[in-house]
Amino acid sequence: GIVSGLAWLRGLPLSPKLADMLYTARSSLSLFQHHDGITGTARDYVVQDYANKMLLAINNCQHVIQQMAHYLLHPDKNTYEADDDKVYFDLDHVRRLAHSLPEQKTLKFNSIQEVQRVVIFNSLTYHRQEVVTLRVSTPDLKVTDWKGNVLQAQVDPHCQLLDMNSQCYDLSFVVSVEPLGMATYLIHLVSPDDSSKASRVKIKVLNSGWTHSQKVMFEDWVNDFDSDKEFSIQNEVISAAFSKSSLLKAVTFKKSGKTVPLHLNFVKYSARPGRERSGAYLFLPDGEENLRFQSPLTLVFHGQIMSKVFVMLPNVQHSVILYNSPGADGLGLEIHNLVDITALNTNYELAMRLSSNINNNNIFYTDLNGLQIIKRKKFNKLPLQGNFYPMPTTMYIEDDETRLTLLSAQPLGVASLREGQIEVMQDRRLLQDDNRGLDQGVMDNRPTLCLFRLLVEEPKQDDCGPQEPSHTAASYAAVQSLNHPLHRLLAPDPDKVAGLDTTYRSGTAMGASTHLVSLSVVNSVREPSSVGLILHRTRFDQCFLPPPNQEDTGRVNVSSLLSITSDMTPSSLSFLYKGTPVSSSQTQDLCPFSVLAFLIPKQSA
């Protein structure tokens, strides 16, 4: 709803069709808050209905986003003629079916289509410099910004290595986008000997089992075929070492030279025998089993923009990515687990475990719905299942020297069962009902992508005093970036976007600890429409240094943020109860963990 709120404030009336699309999406979102929708304790046909409604909501929102983006980039908004049905941009992630994973569109290049235009939208209220990866049809490309400057970029054949019949490559480069802004980038087809084209990554393939012809096919990319051996990837801040089984084993800070042992592995739980067994409601394991992997296929990518390790494990495609980026995505390791346990005919609950040397004294911390952090403790008197807790977005453990933070793009169950451990559930498949009312097992699994960011941080040396459980500035920036990714708008038809501005900027940035929760058009039968603004401020742990160029005052000037001049009305979070109007240029002070809401009328011409 943020981009529709921005367009409405700039003078675009929300048509009945687009308003109905947003209403349907919000109604579906409300339905998904039902407790059975949250926990997965619903019958198969109900889950399918949830999925169908979610797909419709996603498609509706994507249509509204591209419509609003076209208006905001239009140079003359006074003469703009809206066409609700027209598709100006394609959003990069597309779901073919309700249960399928999102797929990237492939940008195709040929003698007729030598340039492709991509618009990046930043929904957060501060400037972002992050890596964007696009799927393209050829490796011979260069990237320029809207000013014509050639950007450093890299290209790799990851999708071809997994499917040798496909003709696609991944193109990665760092974008720079203003707060609540848009920026245009151009991808150009160039000759193979052009010095400005994207650099090719260096690839190591371990335990491939490939034939000679397959090796010859990628001889321009792969510089090493080998079997089990240790290796590492690095950026300017950290280096990550991997064991012979191709799983993470340690992280080293380049500045201090300190190495933190950090062993990643996967464990599985089965259902214990007896009258009561694990099911949709109950988690009654019969103990854990460490999964051991012998010589898995491993692809190691070394590039200027990012380095990556891809490991093909049984039931999991596991990736660890290290971005060489000045933004929030470069603060730690990114982990992708594509879990597929659909073919298993046994009780199987899969978890990812991280083991370190941190002395956390059986204490760990999780967030409460992304708003606050709460302290948890592992009790030996409780059974294993009694020590698991929900993690909406964040979990961390720490001692006096190190904090280990796991950030998640999806809510999951977590525990810290031993000193220095973080364990997070990935997926579960259970063959029997647990007699709690569902009357079926959990067997409707689909391939599921779990996204994480892993941060290892050192506190400041000086005494900062006792601190309430809270994010560090770095972990908050990383989780915001993870859960609010940059939107990539592709322009397949140049004629539809001809004459548009190359950039859009809403206003000035807010502090790093303040988040724009919502900016949505509020329709009322009795009163003129307005935009509802909700702001939330978190608190940073003062024992950790913030990333450079991050300010945190807790003071917000809505007039500067949204470039508006009218008054605004304080209200309840539901926008039903209103206070006395105040000037939008009046600075608002947000205390840590506070939430403020305002209603903003349409700006006069």
Image (cartoon, helix red, strand yellow):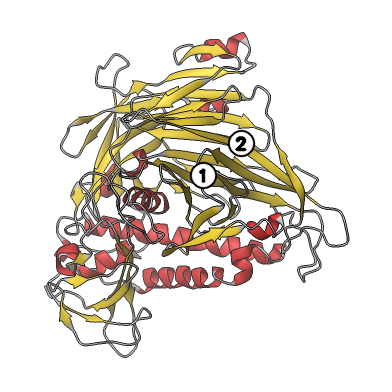
Rendered location of residue 32, percent (x, y): 55, 68
Say if residue 429 shows up in the picture: yes
Q: Is residue 123 above or below residue 269?
A: below
Identify the residue at image location x=59%, y=47%: 423
Q: Is residue 182 above or below residue 116?
A: below
Distance from disc 1 to disc 2, alpha carbons, whole Å, reads 19 Å
Say if residue 406 shows up in the picture: no
Label 1 amino acid?
A: Asn
First in sequence: mark 1 vs mark 2: 2
Rendered location of residue 386, percent (x, y): 67, 60
Label 2 amino acid?
A: Asn
Q: Quadrant of residue 180?
A: bottom left
Identify the residue at image location x=14%, y=76%: 566
Residue at the limit of the structure toward the right, as seen here = 275
| Figure quadrant of the N terminus | bottom left
Q: Crowding near pointer 1: few (<14 within 10 Å), some, many (20+)?
A: some
Rendered location of residue 280, percent (x, y): 72, 61
Q: Secondary structure at mark 1?
A: loop
Query: Mark 1–mark 2 contact, CB under 8 Å?
Result: no
Q: Which residue is more in the foreground, 350 or 340?
A: 350
Give the total of numbered labels.
2
Residue 517: image tag: none
Q: Is residue 242 above or below residue 516?
A: above
Identify the residue at image location x=45%, y=34%: 321
Left/right of residue 561 with respect to residue 273 in the rendered view: left
Rendered location of residue 573, percent (x, y): 36, 78
Left/right of residue 447 with respect to residue 300 in the rendered view: right
Q: Is residue 359 above or below residue 542?
A: above
Q: Crowding near pointer 2: few (<14 within 10 Å), some, many (20+)?
A: some
Q: Secondary structure at mark 2?
A: strand
Residue 359: image tag: 1
The residue that label 2 is drawn on is 265
